[in-house]
Image (cartoon, helix red, strand yellow):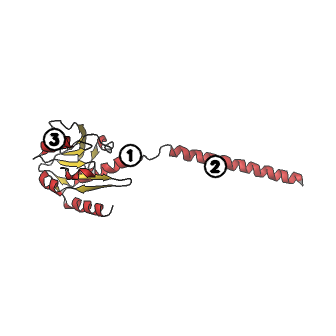
C-alpha cells in the first residue's frame, strides 16, 4: 500500500512541477510584455497633440496657409509627440518648430504658437509682438488663459480639456468655428 501512495505522490509532484513550470513560463511572458509599460507622459503628449490638431482644424486665417506653421515657445511638458510633425485630418501638413520667445520672426513665421512656461515679461513681450497679427495661441497651462492666449489646455491624468479666452479670440484675427467654443464649454462643465 505504501508503494501505491508513493507512486501517486510522485505523479502528483510531477504534475505540480509541470504546472509550476507552465506558470513560470506564462508569468515570464507577461513580465516581458509589461517591460514596456504605457508611459503616462507619452499618453498625455499624444492627447495634447490630438487636441491641438483639433483646435487648428477649426481655425481659419485671413489668408489660409498651404502648410500651417506651429511654433513652440518656452519649456513645455507635452509637446514631444507634436514636435514630430503632424498632419491635420483635412490632410494639411503642420510644420512644428521651436523658437525662442525673443525671435523677431514669430509674428510673420508662425500661424499658431504653443506656449510653455513663460515669465510674465516674456508673455507680455510675445503678445505685444503678435498684436495685429492673425496668430492662434495655445497655452499649455490653463492658468494663463487670462493673459492673451486664445486657448488654454487643462491636462489631467486621463484627458485633455481646454478653455477659450473669447476676448483674445475676438482680437486675434483668426476665426474659430463655434463648435469649438461649445465643445470647450461642455468639457469645462463635464470634466
Q: Which residue is mark 1?
A: 42
Left or right of residue 3, residue 61 in this image: left
Comparing marks 2 and 3, which lies closer to the viewer? 3
Q: Position of residue 92 (x, y in %)?
A: 23, 48
Question: What number is the disc on residue 64?
Answer: none
Please report whichever mark, 3 or 1, sits nearer to the chain's N-terminal start.
1
Classify the position of the N terminus by image quarter. Answer: bottom right
Crowding at mark 2 (Cα within 10 Å: few <14, some 14-19, many 20+): few
Crowding at mark 3 (Cα within 10 Å: few <14, some 14-19, many 20+): few
Mark 2 vs mark 3, CA separation in Å: 63 Å
Q: Which residue is mark 3?
A: 125
Residue occupying image coordinates x 23% and y 63%: 182
Q: Is residue 78 above or below residue 102?
A: below
Mark 2 vs mark 1, CA separation in Å: 32 Å
Left or right of residue 2, residue 124 in this image: left
Q: Which residue is mark 2?
A: 23
Amino acid at each position: 500500500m505504501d508503494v501505491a501512495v508513493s507512486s501517486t505522490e510522485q505523479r502528483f509532484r510531477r504534475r505540480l512541477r509541470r504546472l509550476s513550470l507552465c506558470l513560470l513560463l506564462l508569468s515570464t511572458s507577461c513580465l516581458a510584455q509589461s517591460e514596456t509599460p504605457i508611459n503616462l507622459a507619452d499618453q498625455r503628449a499624444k492627447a495634447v497633440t490630438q487636441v491641438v490638431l483639433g483646435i487648428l482644424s477649426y481655425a481659419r486665417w485671413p489668408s489660409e496657409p498651404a502648410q500651417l506653421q506651429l511654433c513652440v515657445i518656452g519649456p513645455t511638458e507635452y509637446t514631444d509627440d507634436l514636435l514630430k510633425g503632424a498632419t491635420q485630418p483635412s490632410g494639411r501638413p503642420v510644420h512644428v518648430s521651436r523658437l525662442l520667445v525673443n525671435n523677431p520672426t514669430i509674428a510673420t513665421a508662425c500661424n499658431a504658437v504653443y506656449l510653455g512656461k513663460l515669465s510674465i515679461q516674456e508673455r507680455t513681450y510675445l503678445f505685444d509682438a503678435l498684436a495685429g497679427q492673425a496668430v492662434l495661441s495655445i497655452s499649455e497651462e490653463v492658468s494663463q488663459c487670462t493673459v492673451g492666449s486664445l486657448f488654454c489646455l487643462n491636462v489631467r491624468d486621463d484627458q485633455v480639456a481646454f478653455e477659450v479666452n473669447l476676448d483674445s479670440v475676438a482680437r486675434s484675427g483668426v476665426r474659430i468655428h463655434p463648435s469649438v467654443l461649445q465643445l470647450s464649454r461642455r468639457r469645462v462643465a463635464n470634466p
